[in-house]
Image (spheres, rainbow, N blue to C red):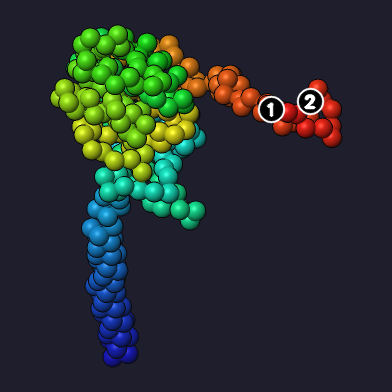
Amino acid sequence: MTEKKEEKEVKAAKKEVKAEAKEKKAEAKPTAKESPAEKKEVKDKEPAKEEKPKTAVKVEKKSSDDEEVKQTNLVDTEKYLNTGSHIGTKFKSGDMRKYIYKVRKDGLNVLDVQTLDQRLGFASKFIANFPKNQVVVVSRKVYGQTPAKAFADSIGANSVTGRFVPGTFTNPESNHFVEPKVVVITDPEADSQAIKEASTIRVPVVALASTNNSLRNIDLAIPINNKGKKSLALGYWILAKEILKAREEIKADTDFSKNPEDFEYKMTEEGEDKKSFRRKPFRSFGRGPPNGRSGQRGRR
């Protein structure tokens, strides 16, 4: 009997030990599972707070900047660059210093394309406020005469090309007399007489100016290459297009029937001008060989 009791007690003790071991395991398992889970949650939360706002801000800034650049351009930036509208001279005046973007290695001053684009838009809205027949565009330069005429024809303005006759704005008795309300100048240096008379009658002057030009008596300057025929054609084409849009005569760029090439000074015109200014052959009177004979001198 005693042996059986002992066996029963041993079995009962084993069961109690097993039960205690199970309870310990059960208590140890949830604590082991919870601790790494809590660590993962902390790790997941901490970088999320730091990374999300940074990436969002960067993306927003890039997209907003790109949209502003596209919206402010009246034409593609490549058109300005391909026509050399941003190329200035090796000289820079104090008035034009603020429009210069940089200086190239060869010494040429480069104009800011964005500023050029903005000034063209502002000038076109300013000119659109005046009556058509009281807008006068002036160009003494050969390369600027064709663009100036095309600009005047497009918006219904008057053009004065070639030599500017003194008194055109100030002498009512002159056959060339014109009474403008706003004057557009191709080159402040070449068209200085027109600027002088416009300031005398107190008329605002809009001028296409390069890096070497002075802005004296000029009310609105457009920083552009005013020496190249392609840049002058593009500048006057943009002005005409934007003026018509400001007047609501056209709604979009595609409604404007003319292209920048229509404003460009043609090479055929340049060739004709060169022929007309060819130097005549020298003719000797008495000192050369008479009748094509050599070795004899003519008498006076």
Is residue 107 among what the camera can see? yes
Category of crowding for the residue at label 2, using alpha-carbon neighbours closer than 10 angstroms: few (below 14), some (14–19), many (at least 20): some
Residue 300's disc is: 1
**Image quarter in which the C terminus is found:** top right
Which of the pair 184/170 is nearer the observer? 170
Question: Left or right: 105 with respect to 199?
Answer: right
Q: Mark 2: which amino acid?
A: Pro
Distance from label 1 to label 2 (Cα)?
12 Å
The residue shown at (28%, 57%) is 51
Residue, far bottom:
2
Q: Position of residue 58 (x, y in %)?
A: 30, 50
Q: Image height check: is 208 above or below 125?
A: below
The quadrant the N terminus occupies is bottom left
Query: Which one is closest to the eye, mark 1 or mark 2?
Result: 1
* Residue count near mark 1 (Cα–Cα under 10 Å), binned few <14, some 14–19, many ≥20: few
Q: Secondary structure at mark 1?
A: loop
Task: From the viewer's side, name the closer residue of 54 and 163.
Answer: 163
Q: Is residue 151 above or below residue 20?
A: above
> x and y percent of residue 79 in the render?
45, 32
Residue 64 in view:
no
Amino acid under label 1?
Arg
Residue name at image x 29 percent, y 78 percent: 21
Residue tagged by mark 2?
Answer: 290
Going from N to C along the chain, the mark reached first, 1 or 2, is 2
Q: Is residue 36 left or right of residue 225?
A: left
Which residue is pictured at 23% across the width and 33% down the height? 218
Task: Give me the residue at 42% from left, 27% from top.
Answer: 141
Label count reads 2
Q: Position of residue 296 (x, y in %)?
A: 82, 32
Closer to the camera, 177 or 103? 177
